[in-house]
């Protein structure tokens, strides 16, 4: 399972973010942003990945453009970088679609096709030739040759070769995308079809060239801080497994960045749990066969855009972010709200919710700490005004949402949780089948998480999955159960 | 020749964000591989990241006195193997 593997490309993306943030705090943002590619690849630099230092700089420039929150595809090459950076300072709103592809980086990645390797023995049986329904294979000079004009990429020949000499070359982003939204165009450049894309972020993690970028909103947030606005951070539960510090130290560290207060999104998750438990019970009473959760933004995009037949089965309850943002805006009508997110999908959700002004992911927050020289492990502790429950804090782990809901349901209610641990082609087929048949054989409370492992497996996390899980679980274990906190409230 | 090799994986904020989060597995795999010939631990900021622009060379790992920049699991294992030769 490819969850958060260490990557050179994450290093480059984070380094650019740190440099951009430092540039913002310097006395000449535009000029220092322009210099980023030159600082990273100075004249005498030994070229690491590409043909020459100029190409590498061009690519770094494009990555910086994504860091500025702009679309790489739509940005004119000839515009001076300093000018772009200055323009971004005037932007009122983040761009609509959160992803952009650095197409020049795609060049090294060959289009998906069937390929005969040197292992081909030119055998007498030639099952490949006989199996191919399209007559695409002939033997020349004792080796099988595929005619690309005729080949339909079915892969049958690869399956029958006794030497396993034929392989299918895959395009990582294409094979990672659960909905077929990204593909190489005629020029070999990956393109995202935004009509289909559900912003799950899987292509971001899958691309070995780091070509798919999130459009960052870091500059927008920094601008608000500089303008002296009152900013409030809303931190998703997954964040408490991300950095080498305690939850209270994290809060103190975030306040040091210039935030006025920090709320746990788990606080809103407690509202989600209560509403969803009530809704589930009501639905069952009315004879419903199953209900799916509704907290994962990637899943919500899937239902809204591509699988509308699931709508009647999806809970009407709002997401933890929704309730948290509502609470924050009620308590602080003058505040600018920033959600700290593990994934790209939440950017889409935030765009539709006027209570959420900006979204930063964990890479960006991490880069911000580095740029400001804040060592989270040395920070003091700041307590949260409202403590969330153990169940809510465990929303970030696959199975956590269903468990939370179940914990509030009466024992006698027949509740059978099912967990969809990550959206992929197969699990989407399963979900469609449940919707079509109106029933799920495996259970009646279906939790859907777009990311494998839950939010801790999000594309923009910083910590590796296992240690993140351990750290978050410690936090969960020292928290009160939702039922206990309920009792206190009702007294 | 029975002095233990010491491996210090920096888990300070800078190194952590720049990639040592993914080096934490060394803390389990190194003892499994080398037994008591190597002492491995996660340590707070080694103080290398804040010098000028050296954050960009993080994560850092120290194998005895040798500083490994932009450390990866492979680089660290290679350095240990060298020392053991
Ligand atoms: S995996 Fe996709 S985005 Fe990455 S280089 Fe290949 S085609 Fe481009
Ligand atoms: S974000 Fe997800 S849905 Fe969109 S192109 Fe990438 S893999 Fe496909
Ligand atoms: S955080 Fe590793 S040297 Fe400072």
Image: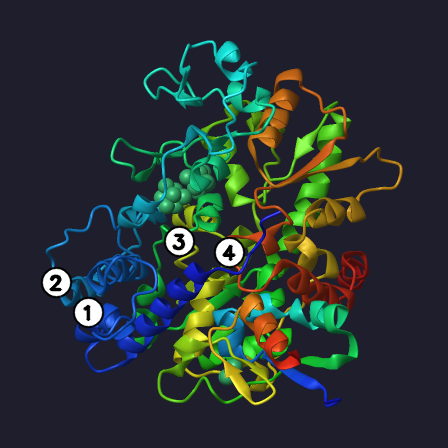
Q: Quadrant of ligand 2?
A: top left
Give whichever of discs 2 and 1 has the lower sequence position.
1
CA neighbours of label 2 inside 10 A, class few (<14), some (14 to 19), many (20+): few
Q: Which residue is mark 2?
A: A80
Give the residue at x 67% y 53%: A397
Which numbered marker is on residue A326?
4
- Which quadrant would residue A63 be assigned to in this image? bottom left
Label 2, label 4: how far apart the Cα atoms are: 41 Å
Give the residue at x 41% y 33%: A181
Left or right: residue A73 compared with residue B74: left
Label 1 SS: helix
Q: Which residue is mark 1?
A: A34
In the rendered image, residue A218, in percent from the top left (x then y), is placed at: 35, 65
Label 2 SS: loop
Label 1, label 4: how far apart the Cα atoms are: 39 Å
Q: Are marks 3 and 1 in contact (CB under 8 Å)?
A: no
Give the residue at x 60% y 29%: A426
């Amino acid at each position: 399972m490819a969850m958060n593997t260490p990557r050179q490309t994450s290093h480059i993306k984070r380094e650019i973010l740190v440099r951009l943030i430092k540039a913002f705090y310097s006395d000449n943002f535009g000029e220092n942003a322009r210099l980023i590619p030159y600082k990273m690849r100075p004249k005498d630099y030994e070229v690491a990945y590409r043909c020459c230092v100029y190409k590498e700089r061009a690519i770094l420039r494009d990555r910086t453009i994504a860091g500025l929150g702009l679309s790489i595809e739509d940005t004119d090459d000839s515009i001076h970088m300093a000018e772009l950076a200055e323009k971004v300072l005037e932007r009122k709103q983040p761009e609509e679609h959160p992803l952009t592809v650095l197409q020049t980086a795609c060049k090294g990645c060959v289009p998906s096709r069937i390929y005969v390797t040197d292992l081909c023995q030119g055998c007498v049986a030639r099952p490949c030739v006989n199996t191919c329904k399209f007559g695409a294979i002939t033997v020349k000079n004792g080796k099988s040759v595929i005619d690309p004009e005729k080949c339909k990429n079915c892969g049958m020949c690869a399956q029958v070769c006794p030497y396993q000499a034929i392989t299918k070359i895959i395009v990582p982003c294409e094979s990672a995308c659960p909905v077929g939204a990204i593909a190489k165009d005629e020029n070999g450049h990956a393109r995202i079809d935004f009509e289909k894309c559900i912003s799950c972020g899987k292509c971001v993690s899958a691309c070995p060239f780091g070509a798919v970028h999130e459009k960052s909103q870091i500059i927008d947030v920094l601008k608000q801080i500089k303008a002296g606005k009152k900013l409030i951070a809303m931190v998703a539960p997954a964040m408490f497994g991300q950095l080498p510090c305690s939850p209270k130290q994290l809060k103190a560290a975030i306040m040091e960045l210039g935030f006025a207060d920090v709320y746990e999104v788990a606080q809103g998750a407690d509202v989600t749990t209560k509403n969803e438990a009530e809704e589930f019970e009501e639905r069952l009473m009315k004879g419903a066969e199953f209900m799916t959760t509704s907290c994962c933004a990637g899943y919500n995009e899937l239902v809204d855009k591509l699988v509308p037949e699931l709508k009647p089965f999806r809970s009407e309850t709002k997401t933890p972010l929704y309730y948290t943002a509502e609470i924050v805006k009620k308590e602080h009508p003058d505040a600018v709200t920033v959600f700290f997110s593990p994934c790209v999908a939440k950017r889409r959700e935030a765009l539709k919710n006027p209570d959420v002004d900006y979204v930063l992911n964990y890479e960006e927050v991490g880069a911000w700490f580095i740029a400001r020289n804040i060592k989270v492990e040395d920070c003091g502790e700041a307590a949260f005004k409202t403590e969330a429950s153990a169940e809510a804090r465990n929303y970030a782990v696959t199975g956590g949402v269903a468990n939370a809901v179940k914990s509030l349901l009466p024992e006698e209610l027949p509740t059978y949780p099912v967990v969809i641990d990550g959206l992929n082609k197969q699990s989407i087929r399963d979900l469609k089948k449940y919707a079509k048949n109106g029933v799920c054989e495996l259970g009646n409370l279906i939790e859907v998480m777009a990311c494998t492992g839950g939010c801790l497996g999000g594309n923009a996390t910083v910590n590796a999955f296992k240690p993140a899980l351990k750290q978050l679980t410690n936090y969960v274990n020292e928290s009160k159960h939702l039922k206990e906190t309920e009792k206190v409230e009702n007294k | 020749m029975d002095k233990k090799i010491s491996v210090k994986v920096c888990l300070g904020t800078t190194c952590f964000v720049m990639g040592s989060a993914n080096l934490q597995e060394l803390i389990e795999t190194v003892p499994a591989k080398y037994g008591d010939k190597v002492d491995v631990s996660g340590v707070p900021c080694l103080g290398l990241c804040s010098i000028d622009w050296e954050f960009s060379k993080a994560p850092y790992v120290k194998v005895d006195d040798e500083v490994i920049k932009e450390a990866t699991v492979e680089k660290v294992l290679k350095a240990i193997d060298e020392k053991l030769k």
